[in-house]
Amino acid sequence: MKVIIDTNSLLSLVRYYLPFDKENILLNFIKEKIEIGEIIIIDKVYEQCTYNSKGLILKQLSFLTDKSFLKKSKTPYKTDSLLAPSPAKFLRMVENQFVVPVQRKKITEVEFEVRKNQHLEDADTKQIILCLNLTKDEEDVLLVTEETAESNDNKLFKKIPAICSELNISCITLPELLKMYETEDFSILFKK
């Protein structure tokens, strides 16, 4: 199984889970999963980690600044030449199914083209394209995000869970991922 994780999920991990991980069991578990390539952090997410919340993620997950760890784990995953398996079909979906119609009507065609191109280069879209490519290669893939499908904050494009639903990509939250990975070692995080 491959897990693609977004910036907000990593931020939640360091803010809400690691402070209770006194013996670094969860931290070491996450580090190991990244090292073996089961959890993937793409380059766009890694870049966001450097400035999001004053670099808190990289401070707390200090192994992500260790050059030998990054080289060994092939982190961050490079997405600059990553294309969707069916680029023309994916582009049509971006233009028609992934756009929020109410927001689309508010802008000109030129503005739409600019924002569409920005969207295609952003971390969310690159993660989705990576999921599509891994699925095409018959990998089991999960995209981990803290976003919800419902609220859209007046954005032009739908949120990750809504797009994943359209593409049949499994999308879960960080608590759901940790619950899947639950072992005796860090089950204390889930006690009621």
Image (cartoon, grey):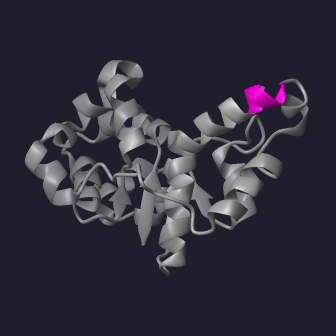
Asked whether 34 or 79 is in front, the reply is: 79
> Which residue is at 54% across, 76% downward?
136
Q: Nearer the viewer, residue 35 or 158?
A: 158
Q: Residue at x 17, y 37 (%)?
A: 65
User: Is the N terminus in the top left, top right, bottom left or bottom right quadrant?
Assistant: bottom left
Is residue 145 something that shows in the picture?
no
Locate residue 135 relative to residue 81 in the image: left or right: right
Q: Is residue 120 above or below residue 185?
A: above
- Residue located 84% across and 25% down the image: 108
Residue 48 within the segment the image draws in magenta: no
**Residue 7 appears in which quarter of the rendering?**
top left
Q: Nearer the viewer, residue 29 or 9?
A: 9
Horizontal and vertical percent position of residue 129? 55, 58
Q: Residue at coordinates 35% horizontally, 39% vertically from top-left? A: 46
Q: Position of residue 139 (x, y in %)?
A: 47, 77
Q: Main secondary structure of the magenta part?
A: helix
Question: What residue occupies the far bottom of the structure in this picture?
Answer: 138
What percent of the width, then of the height, locates residue 21? 27, 42
Residue 101 drawn at (x, y percent):
89, 38
User: Residue 167 lies in what quarter of the image?
Assistant: bottom right
Q: Is residue 10 left or right of residue 64?
A: right
Spot the residue most to the front. 110
Please state which of residues 101 and 18 is positioned toward the viewer in this rendering. Answer: 101
Which stretch is magenta? 108-112
